[in-house]
Amino acid sequence: MVAFQRDRLMISLIVFFLVTAGAASFGALFQPGPWYAGLAKPALTPPDWVFPVTWTVLYALIAVAGWLLWRARGRAALAGPAVAAWGVQLVLNAAWSWLFFGLHLTGTALAELAILWTAILVTVLLSRRSAPVAGMLMLPYLAWVGFAGWLNYGIWRLNG
């Protein structure tokens, strides 16, 4: 029985990694390319290599956070809504790349990023009692999306 429960936990963790990787893969369909290279960017824009490294770490944290929330859903009242908020932020995460890099809608992407940041914050707040570690794992992501919002705003202003 213990081995079955352990296997079930591992399978569910793998599923959360696959779902998160799916969102990451969708976003990766929309590469920066020559359009992005030609944009004026804010002074603190990191070099291009920073983005995939940072996102790889963040996606791993996002997957584990979602899994921890999912595991808490039977024993904590706010875990279900936290899982739902986690799912919403993941969809919004994937959509940003499509809006910004795919459609070149920097202003719309900025507005969507504000909604994404809010969805991440809601996930963090809902997880405080149900799965506090999950909320802590989402904090670097919240900070990075805030920084990405500043970059998006700068690009929108400089190229609008």
Image (cartoon, rainbow, N blue to C red):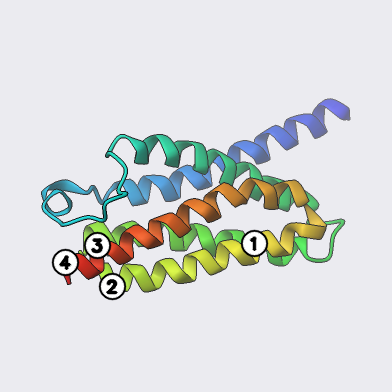
- Badge 3 or badge 2: first in the primary sequence: 2
- For the point 54% across and 65% down, which residue is it? 88
Work out how far the residue at label 3 is from the one at label 4, CA to CA, in angstroms. 6 Å
Instruction: Say which amino acid is labelled 3.
Output: Ile
Give neighbour class at mark 1: few <14, some 14-19, many 20+ (Cα, 10 Å). many
In this view, which residue lies farthest toward the top? 3
Which of discs 3 and 2 lies nearer the camera? The answer is: 3
Cβ–Cβ under 8 Å for marks 3 and 4: yes
Q: Position of residue 9 (x, y in %)?
A: 74, 36
Where does label 2 land, which residue?
107
Where does label 1 land, which residue?
123
Left or right of residue 45, residue 128 in this image = right
Where does label 3 land, which residue?
155
Where does label 4 land, which residue?
159
Which of discs 4 and 1 lies nearer the camera? The answer is: 4
SS at badge 1: helix
Q: Position of residue 69 (x, y in %)?
A: 72, 52
SS at badge 2: helix
Give neighbour class at mark 2: few <14, some 14-19, many 20+ (Cα, 10 Å). some
Give neighbour class at mark 4: few <14, some 14-19, many 20+ (Cα, 10 Å). few
